[in-house]
Amino acid sequence: MIETEYIERLTKVEERSKSNTHQIEDLKPVVNEIHTMSKTMVELIGEVRHTNENVSELKEKVEIMEQEPGKQWTATKRTFFTAITSSIGTAVAAGILYLISRGGF
């Protein structure tokens, strides 16, 4: 190669180098923004996990609250049944005692 070819190639390499340097400088803010967004995403993931834990706790509490009326209704039915059977038993016993005291048996 002759000297002019070296000069031409060197000139092209320098031009490409300047162009690459400009492109790199243009990309630095983008890279910084990507890093910032990445940190923000990590924080958001932590908050979402915390929110999911809270939602799970609330779900459990709601399920318990939903079961309470059913338990109360069951207890009410049991009390009512006990009262009715006790009343019937008392009436039968009173009738038998009445008949025995009157000499009916």
Image (cartoon, rainbow, N blue to C red):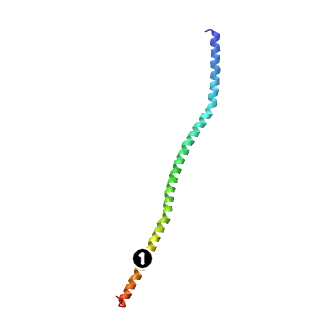
For badge 1, the amino acid type reads Thr
- Left or right: 96 as drawn, with respect to 80: left
Does 91 sit left or right of 40 as displayed? left
**Label 1 neighbourhood size at 10 Å, few (<14), some (14-19), many (20+)?**
few
Q: As drawn, which residue projects farthest toward the bottom?
A: 102
| Element at label 1 | helix
Q: Is residue 58 above or below residue 26?
A: below
**Residue that appears at 59% across and 37% down:** 34
Q: Between residues 74 and 105, which one lies in front from this camera angle?
A: 105
The residue under the point 42% across, 74% down is 82
Q: Position of residue 94 (x, y in %)?
A: 39, 84
Compared to residue 97, the image places residue 29 above or below, namely: above
| Percent position of residue 37, x then y | 58, 40
Residue occupied by mark 1: 85
Q: Is residue 55 above or below residue 19?
A: below
Q: The N terminus appears in which quarter of the rendering? A: top right
**Image x and y of residue 52, in percent:** 52, 50
Left or right: 14, with 63 as reference point: right
Q: Quadrant of residue 91?
A: bottom left
**Residue 42 rendering spot, x and y as whole percentages:** 54, 42
Q: Quadrant of the C terminus?
A: bottom left
In the depicted view, which residue is nearer to us: 42 or 91?
Answer: 91
> Based on the displayed image, in which of its 4 quarters is residue 21 positioned?
top right
Q: Residue at x 50, y 55 (%)?
A: 57
Numbered circles on residues, count: 1
Q: Is residue 70 left or right of residue 6?
A: left
Q: What residue do we see at 63% from left, 28% from top?
A: 23
Q: Outermost residue, top direction?
A: 2
